[in-house]
């Protein structure tokens, strides 16, 4: 094991001490099992020594004298999407890619270096000098969050239909996994700078559920987004916030929003939409991750209009158009959701709960009384 020192490359971000993405859940448990016996103990520094080379964004951690080069093995996308290994797929990928997966979050996930079903690299990413992970593969535990991959697939589909920037994503044929392309990696293998909103607020990941959206999200966009792009960024962020309310996503915490940039002294822009799910199918009484107007209760239409006006400088007409668009997108997507869960899922009840959550969001937050989604 490397000694407990850390270094990062010269193109680092704003606050390295807060920017570590340490594995949680199944990924952390696997790494502990794999390394704790040899070391006797296995704390966060030991974990960082294993996965510090493969973090989201530019920051890398390693033994002080070690090279920061990555050499992630290739993995067929078709093998994942067609789920040829069945229920053993996650165990297989975990063994192969755990040490290359500096990812936070409790959902079972790994980072892979993908090739398509013809064995070709992903565009310029097949270069010999390009050895990084290109995609994130997420799974779900049937005992906790059944059909979470399909849930995220349809929520990201809604964001894409609303014109928000979303990384390329694909749901596997079995629904066991969702494959998402990394957005912090250029086609030439150069990392983009990335900071989540814990970093931008100068707080640790443990505080990701603390504070209010007004100051810790919307105000920080004004502080960090380039003035030339700020108006559009605030409108997109408001659109995403409205969508989160309609979807009933109670996990929209500070690490699930971010900014990206090419140069540490240059302009920053909002990161693409990621980690977007509806939480009510699993937690029927779930509330918002942060507060709005001092409360974690879901906002009504009046509160959303006030937020759009005061924090995003949007006109009432634009705000109304965004809420109309959100309701229309979810209404149009609902038959596809119902069809998928009816024909493909062994957890059909999740589809019904998902549509019911959307219906609640459309009615209570957007103020529309519509027929039940189906």
Image (cartoon, rainbow, N blue to C red):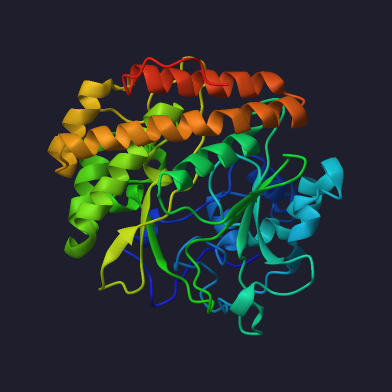
Question: 217 left or right of 168?
Answer: left
Residue drawn at x 45%, y 64% is 57
Where's residue 312, x and y in %? 18, 43
Q: Looking at the picture, does residue 311 appear above or below residue 200?
A: above
Q: Looking at the picture, does residue 362 appear above or below residue 90?
A: above
Where's residue 298, x and y in %? 34, 21
Most foreground residue, 212 or 274 = 274
Question: 72 left or right of 317?
Answer: right
Residue drawn at x 28%, y 41% is 238
Most foreground residue, 164 or 141 = 164
Most foreground residue, 161 or 133 = 161
Residue drawn at x 34%, y 47% is 198
Q: Looking at the picture, does residue 339 appear above or below residue 257?
A: above
Residue 106 visible somewhere in the drawing: no
Quadrant for the C terminus, please. Answer: top right
Residue drawn at x 77%, y 40% is 174
Quadrant for the N terminus, please. Answer: bottom right
Farthest residue, direction bottom: 128
The part of the image, by quadrant, that contains residue 316 is: top left
Most foreground residue, 201 or 4 = 201
Question: 147 left or right of 75?
Answer: left
Where's residue 220, x and y in %? 23, 49
Residue 12 visible somewhere in the drawing: yes
Question: 5 left or right of 195?
Answer: right
């Amino acid at each position: 094991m490397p000694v407990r020192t850390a270094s990062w490359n010269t193109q680092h971000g704003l606050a390295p001490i807060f920017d570590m993405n340490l594995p949680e859940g199944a990924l952390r448990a696997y790494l502990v099992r794999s390394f704790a016996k040899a070391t006797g103990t296995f704390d966060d520094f030991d974990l960082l020594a294993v996965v510090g080379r493969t973090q989201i964004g530019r920051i890398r951690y390693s033994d002080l004298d070690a090279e920061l080069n990555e050499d992630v093995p290739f993995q067929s996308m078709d093998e994942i999407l067609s789920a040829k290994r069945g229920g053993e797929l996650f165990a297989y990928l975990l063994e192969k890619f755990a040490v290359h997966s500096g990812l936070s979050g409790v959902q079972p996930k790994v980072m892979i270096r993908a090739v398509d079903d013809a064995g070709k690299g992903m565009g310029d990413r097949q270069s010999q000098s390009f050895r990084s992970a290109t995609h994130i593969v997420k799974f779900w535990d049937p005992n906790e969050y059944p059909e979470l991959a399909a849930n995220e697939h349809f929520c990201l589909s809604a964001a894409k239909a609303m014109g928000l920037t979303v990384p390329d994503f694909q749901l596997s044929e079995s629904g066991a996994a969702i494959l998402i392309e990394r957005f912090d990696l250029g086609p030439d293998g150069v990392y983009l700078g990335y900071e989540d909103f814990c970093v931008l607020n100068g707080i640790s990941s443990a505080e990701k559920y603390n504070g209010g959206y007004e100051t810790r999200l919307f105000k920080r966009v004004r502080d960090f987004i380039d003035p030339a792009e700020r108006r559009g960024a605030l409108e997109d962020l408001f659109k995403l916030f409205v969508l989160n309310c309609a979807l009933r996503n109670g996990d929209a915490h500070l690490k699930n929003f971010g900014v990206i940039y090419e140069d540490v002294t240059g302009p920053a822009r909002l990161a693409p939409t990621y980690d977007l799910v509806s939480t009510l199918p699993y937690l029927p009484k779930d509330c918002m991750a942060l507060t709005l107007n001092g409360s974690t209760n879901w906002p009504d239409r009046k509160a959303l209009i006030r937020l759009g006006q005061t924090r995003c400088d949007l006109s009432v007409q634009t705000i109304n158009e965004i809420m109309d668009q959100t309701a229309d997108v979810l209404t149009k997507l609902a038959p596809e959701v119902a069809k998928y869960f009816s024909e493909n899922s062994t957890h059909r009840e999740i589809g019904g709960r998902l549509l019911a959550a959307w219906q609640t969001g459309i009615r209570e937050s957007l103020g529309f009384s519509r027929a039940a989604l189906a």
